[in-house]
Image: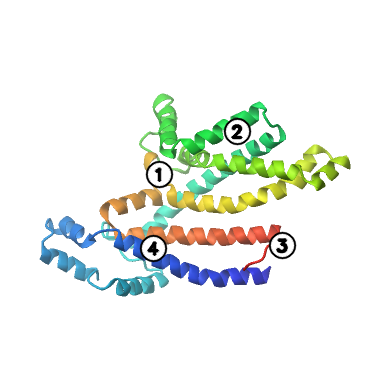
Amino acid sequence: MKRFIIKRLILLVPMLLVVTMATFALSTMSAGDPAAIIARAETGTNSQKAVELVREELNLNRSYPQQYVHWLEKVVRLDMGTSYQTKKPVSEELMQRFPATLLLTVCATGIMFTLSLILGILSALHPNSLVDRIAKILSFITVSVPPFLFGLLLLYLFGVQWKLVSVVGSAGAGAVWLPAITLGVSHCGPFIMLIKSNMLRVLGMGYIKAARARGIKERSVVLHHALRNAILPALTKLGVTFGSMLGGSAVVESIFSWPGLGQMALDAIYNKDIPVLQGFMLVVATMIVLINLLVDIVYKSLDTKISIA
């Protein structure tokens, strides 16, 4: 196990280097000319002279490789630059926003996994029952309806009709449940079907039939013998989904005015605030890499037959 973890940590270094290259390239080359936008915002004009002054001040007149090396040196020192818009350190802004997004993502993942686990197991144990039909309908709806429509519906019902939440949003931890339900339920469809199919496959195996033949109670067969093997393939998908929620919650955060990283990233895209956009992409990509590492370690601890190439 120790050898497995060391190998995965060594592989982490080139992987993170590729992440920094992709982050820099995507954010820099797709953002247009931020110098012209900043010059217009600060001086009211985007004349050639004003643009050149801004470009020189922000080191934007260097070549892309030089800018990347300079940026990477600062990132290694945990310095992600300064926001063009707020003039605050990007790391400070990320630290302020990250807890809100992490709270939202953890709650959404908990809701998604709990709901999927219950419906997936019950659907496998009782095919063609009412619960199975509800699970199929919910799965179809969640993969067909975009999260923003579901979020707007919830906001209308709970905010406008029943007046249980503020429609202009709230930063308190108690306000997280509505965006968390939106984000969690919108991702649960594939998980329900995955857990159901895994349970059906495992319940048909010989060792389950043998356990039943030995007179072991059905509850013990399901929870102690079948569930562990059925849930293993879902762990990898759970890690990927957690990462996608972490980086893809911008629309949900915007609908509910949740003060997280997603809303900050949308503002950065609108204002072409490259340092903030780079910081957001780097943090999210790094989190996804680390989550996948954690999932691999958990998977390995549960199934020792897995090896690393």
- The reply, left or right, for residue 146 in relation to residue 238 is left
Amino acid found under the numbered disc labelled 2:
Ala
Callout 2–callout 4 Cβ contact below 8 Å = no
- The reply, left or right, for residue 237 in relation to residue 31 is right
Q: Nearer the viewer, mark 4 or mark 1?
A: 4
The residue tagged with tag 3: helix, strand or loop?
loop
Per the image, the residue denoted by label 3 is: 305
Amino acid found under the numbered disc labelled 3:
Lys
The local crowd at label 1, few if under 14, some if 14 to 19, many if 20 or more residues have their Cα within 10 Å, is: many
Per the image, the residue denoted by label 2 is: 135
The reply to whether residue 275 is in sight is no
Which of the two residues, 300 or 246, is positioned nearer the viewer here?
A: 300
The reply to whether residue 232 is in sight is yes
The local crowd at label 4, few if under 14, some if 14 to 19, many if 20 or more residues have their Cα within 10 Å, is: many
Amino acid found under the numbered disc labelled 4:
Thr
Question: CA–CA distance between discs 1 and 2?
Answer: 27 Å
Q: Nearer the viewer, mark 1 or mark 3?
A: 3
Q: Earlier in the sequence, mark 3 or mark 4?
A: 4
The local crowd at label 2, few if under 14, some if 14 to 19, many if 20 or more residues have their Cα within 10 Å, is: many
Residue drawn at x 66%, y 72% as measured from the top left: 3
Q: Nearer the viewer, mark 3 or mark 4?
A: 3
Question: CA–CA distance between discs 1 and 3?
Answer: 41 Å
Residue drawn at x 18%, y 60% as measured from the top left: 36
Amino acid found under the numbered disc labelled 1:
Glu
Quarter holding residue 196: top right
Question: CA–CA distance between discs 3 and 2?
Answer: 33 Å
Q: Earlier in the sequence, mark 2 or mark 4?
A: 4
Q: Earlier in the sequence, mark 3 or mark 2?
A: 2
Per the image, the residue denoted by label 1 is: 253
Question: Residue 23 shows which numbered tag?
Answer: 4
Question: CA–CA distance between discs 4 and 1?
Answer: 22 Å
Q: Earlier in the sequence, mark 4 or mark 1?
A: 4
